[in-house]
Image (tube, rainbow, N blue to C red):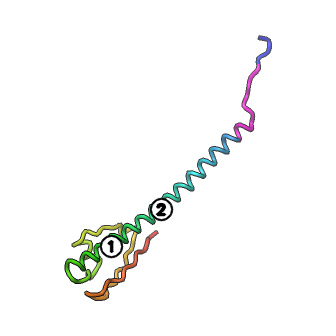
Amino acid sequence: MLFSVKKEKSDIWKFISLALLIICIVLFALFSSKLSESNTAKSRGTLERALNRSITQCYALEGTYPPNLKYLTDHYGLTYDNDYYYIDYNYIGSNLRPDVTIIERK
């Protein structure tokens, strides 16, 4: 062999592979943040349904609405993450549905 020919990748292919890697990383970051937002919304919805179900069940069984949130957690098995959610529970009276607001802590 008189001449040895080395085939080297051109710089354009290196640039394309690097660009594809960056695009994949950006897309992964975008989709993971959307997934996190979706999970947060579903979690909040689940908490709202559980809270409403517990309040309604208490009224149906006892004839009065629960006086506070602790009563629901002690007697009706309501559980939630205190570090992530704040529940503002305003007891109006034994025959009036309490005003409940769920606030996310960040």
Residue 35 painted magenta? no
Locate residue 64 relative to residue 28 in the image: left or right: left
- Picture layout, residue 98 above or below residue 3: below
Local crowd size for mark 1, using a 10 Å CA cut-off: few (<14), some (14–19), many (≥20): many
Residue 59 in percent (x, y) is at: 24, 80
Q: Residue at x 24, y 77 (%)?
A: 58
Q: Secondary structure at mark 2?
A: helix
Label 2 is placed on what type of residue? Ser
Locate residue 63 relative to residue 104 in the image: left or right: left
Q: Are marks 1 and 2 in contact (CB under 8 Å)?
A: no
- The residues tagged by marks 1 and 2 sit, at their Cα atoms, a distance apart of 20 Å
For disc 2, the marked residue is: 38
Residue 68 in percent (x, y) is at: 28, 80
Quarter of image, res 47 = bottom left
Instruction: Count all numbered tags in the image, as a single digit.
Output: 2
Local crowd size for mark 2, using a 10 Å CA cut-off: few (<14), some (14–19), many (≥20): few
- Picture layout, residue 41 above or below residue 94: above
Q: Which residues are magenta?
A: 5-15
| Nearest to N terminus: mark 1 or mark 2 | 2
Give the label on residue 51, or none: 1
Quarter of image, res 54 = bottom left
